[in-house]
Image (tube, rainbow, N blue to C red):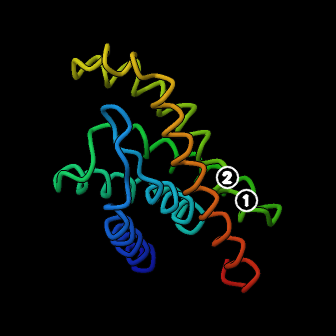
Amino acid sequence: MNAKTLAYVVVFTGLGLALAPISFPVGPTRAFPGQHFVNGLAGVLIGPWALLVALLISTIRLMLGLGTVFAYPGSLPGALAVALASYFLRRRGLHAYAPLAEPLGTLGIGFPLSAYVVAPALGLGERFAAGLIPIFAGWAASTAVGSAAAFFVASALRRLGRL
């Protein structure tokens, strides 16, 4: 990792933590649109290092009591999806659209992982299953808002020639 990438990791982690109080409870989880926003921008700007940012934000939020263990499966797959989308779209000059892939990772990989692995391992399987649709809706709203915001910022950066 070079110094510029490290600086991005620190700034994105700080941004995610500054936005951390803006979350809402959804069953045994906390939906955090700021995480999806940071995942979208970090995935476009620093690629796979966005996974480190998501890991740091999730860990620090958990330690501060601002998040739950569901932050890991809720954020890491989304960051990976954006980083991969950015890699493949960069060749066509369309990498500003990569943040829109964040819901695929969060809802397509992270949510099933939470429902079928993490929740049962924590003894929350029944509680999670009872609220499956509301939890999914809360996560979908969270990732939609965060990903859309990241898309608009990435598009603005692209128009400004910074992306």
* Residue 156 percent location from the top left of the image: 70, 78
- Quarter occupied by the N terminus: bottom left
How many angstroms separate mark 1 from mark 2 (CA)?
A: 6 Å
Q: Is residue 40 left or right of residue 69?
A: right
Q: Quadrant of the C terminus?
A: bottom right
**Within 10 Å of the Cα at label 1, are there few (<14), some (14-19), or many (20+) other Cα atoms?**
many
- Residue 8 placement: quadrant: bottom left
Name which residue lies at 48% across and 24% down.
Answer: 112
Vertical position of residue 162 compared to residue 102: above or below: below
**Residue positioned 39% across, 28% down in the render:** 114
* Closer to the camera in the image, 136 or 70: 136
**CB contact under 8 Å: marks 1 and 2:** yes
> Where in the figure is residue 4, as x and y percent of width and height?
45, 79
Q: Which residue is mark 2?
A: 100
Q: Amino acid at mark 2?
A: Leu
User: Mark 1 falls on what kind of element?
Assistant: helix
Amino acid type of the residue tagged 1 in the rendering? Tyr
